[in-house]
Image (cartoon, grey):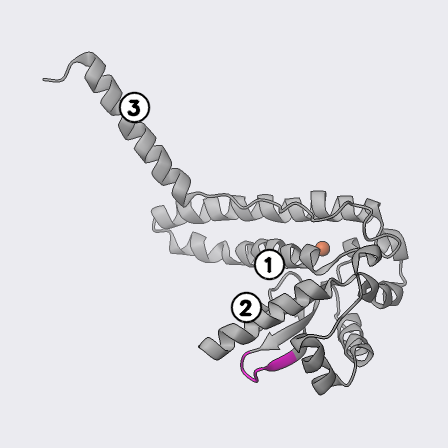
Amino acid sequence: MLSTKAFSAGRQLARAASSARVGAVRSKHTVPDLDYDYDELEPVISAKIMRLHHDKHHAAYVANLNATEEKLRNAEAAHDLAAQVALQPALRFNAGGHVNHTIFWKNLIGEKNGGGQLHACALKTAIEQKYGSLETLSAQVNAKTAAIMGSGWGWLTFNPATASLDVITTANQDMAAAVGHVPLLGVDAWEHAYYLDYNNVKADYFKNIWRVVNWKDVAQRYDAAVAKHRAA
Ligand SMILES: [Fe+2]
């Protein structure tokens, strides 16, 4: 028979193991730190927008994503299919909000640190082959993104179906990956991304954002997408 002390220790071990299992399953999403200061992107995007956008808007998507996943786990445990189905719109919206913004922060960098500069690389060659020039590409992205009715994103993607670059838009927080594309560069067309700086002149935000594109990051995403496609 176990002593009281041994029994207590065993119970603690069991609790720790159970807690570890729960922890492994219930890993929470977190807002990634920016690689740069809030004022890095000025004057294209102000520090005020960056603080709100990163610390409040992105944080809200992450908090709501974690809450939705918790509800989904409970619904799954209860074998409640109706509840699981009802949670899908919230999962789609908040997962997209987290994933899209995580890409967006990496896609940007200040002008003084190389923003807007696309040097010779496979991506530059692919852009010039398909669109003629970076200016033509940016005009196409801007035109398509400006045509979004309501909120959404403009994307430069790698389209595995055609093994080439593509320009698409997604509504609300829908992910490019959810429609089969590999996102390379995202342009956030939500009002929260520009309104404090540009008011209703959205076209100026779209025009200026190319000055702070981190082409090094975009090119790395392109290289990875092409390599994965060739290996498939
Ligand atoms: Fe946003």
Magenta stretch mostly in which secondary structure?
loop
Answer yes or no: disc 1 within 8 Å of ligand 1. Answer: no
In front: 83, or 148? Answer: 148
Q: Which residue is mark 3?
A: 12
Residue 91 within the magenta-colored segment of the rendering: no
Mark 3 vs mark 1: in front: 3
Give the alpha-carbon distance from disc 3 to disc 1, as whole Å: 39 Å
Nearer the viewer's eye, disc 3 or disc 2? 3
Q: In the image, is residue 121 above or below residue 209?
A: below
Amino acid type at mark 1: Gly
Span highlighted in magenta in the image: 160-165
* Residue, disc 2: 178
Camera-side residue of 49 and 148: 49
* Mark 3 and mark 2: Cα distance apart in space: 43 Å
The residue located at (69%, 64%) in the rendering is 216
Q: Residue furthest left?
A: 1
